[in-house]
Amino acid sequence: MEGSGKSDLFTAVLRLADDHLVLGHRLSEWCGHAPMLEEDLAMPNMALDLIGQARSLYQYAGELEGRGRGEDDLAYVRREREYYNCLLVERPNGDFAHTMLKQLWFAAYMEPFWAQVAKSPDETLAAIAGKAVKEMAYHVRHAGEWVIRLGDGTAESAARMQAAVEDLSPYLGELFEDDDISRNLADEGILPAPSSLQPHWERTVGGIFAEADLQMPEIALRQRGGRTGIHGESMGHLLAELQHMQRTYPGAQW
Amino acid sequence: MSQPAVKCPDAAAAWAAAASVPDPEVPCVTVADLGILRDVVMENGIAVAKVTPTYSGCPATVAIELAIEAALRDAGFEPRIERVMSPAWTTDWISEEGREKLREYGIAPPEKASNSVRALFGETSVNCPKCGSSRTERISEFGSTPCKAHYRCMHCAEPFDYFKCI
């Protein structure tokens, strides 16, 4: 691949890795606080999937960059403006309804994404995708069941789920936004264009929302910036905790 | 995965050493029973063990690799571990013997070649490993490790782990 193509791929892989690391970190914040024991096991397990995927992606990003940065350097010692995750994943957990909705929306986006990447000519990404697509199918199912249970539950649970839909829907548009980097990679058949995933996403989430008796949100570009390193207020707080160990003891390993 | 047919004596001995390593989280089965150990080949006098992780974030992956390395070294080999990501591990690679060992240990083995996980909310029927009843219910999709779900038998009332099908 040519020079600019390689740097596009590096940025695209970093965006993916950051999505998974940040969402995995958010989920791990629930450890010990879940509403029931089974969920206290489920959420860290899903966090492990996400962080495991992030590790593979960071390793690959480090190889693509070729400047000797490894997974820990990329995950833990960049500055906020150098993280390219979408804004949805960094949103604070809020209540359980917010967390499960965020989880569902992200997994329903990643499942068709990985299904396509599994056929990518990029062998490393195809191998990562082969594992991740199976894991995301579980996340869709698990979070989807909760969205139905809460949306179609009591007046209180339904109101909370509807509030979560309203709070988080401004961040949906960014998921499906194309830019030059994603368009170049889609043209080469390496990664799917974000916009191409929207119909599949609407089918998955639409089916669950119909059962949950929830109104599908409008997907419009409202909040954006994550893909170019512009984040919300909560991101700095998240990074302070995420990076604490490597900032305090640089290079620590165990 | 069964041992590949044609092997030099060294490779066969190296396979035997590596294949005997138990899984750290499910010690009733070996890494060969689970299909995590894909192959062992001799390359310029070095025993290269090809290992595949079950889940992307499986915390046992590193422990498994270290244990295989140690087992090869104990058997007199100079070991190297090669992590293979593709093709992705599937529960279909768990051997018949491994499935039987899981059942005896109290873990329901995965339903073979089942795609039901992809059919949203499609329920798989899982038999109780203690009494064999099919009257079981799922308590949680995620159990004590990423590869297991938590079930309960409605017949003998025993809670048990189910090795998820992926």
Image (cartoon, rainbow, N blue to C red):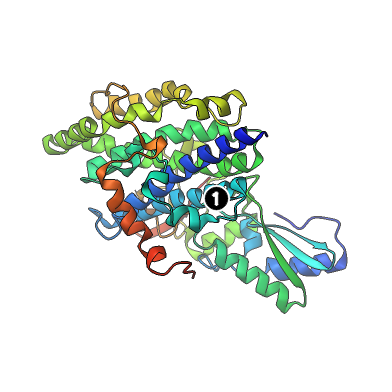
Image mark 1: chain: A
Q: Residue at x 56, y 53 (%)?
A: B54
Q: Is residue B116 left or right of residue B91?
A: left
Q: Is residue B153 visible?
A: no
Q: Nearer the viewer, residue A95 or A142?
A: A95
Q: Is residue B47 visible?
A: yes
Q: Residue at x 86, y 67 (%)?
A: B9
A198 is higher (above) or lower (below) than A110: above
Image quadrant of residue A174?
A: top left
Q: Nearer the viewer, residue B27 or A41?
A: A41
Q: Residues within 10 Å of mark 1 (few under 14, many from 20)?
A: some
Q: Amino acid at mark 1?
A: Ser
Image quadrant of residue B153?
A: bottom left
Q: Secondary structure at mark 1?
A: helix
Q: Position of residue A145 (x, y in %)?
A: 32, 38
Q: Position of residue B146 (x, y in %)?
A: 45, 54
What residue is pinned by disc 1? A56
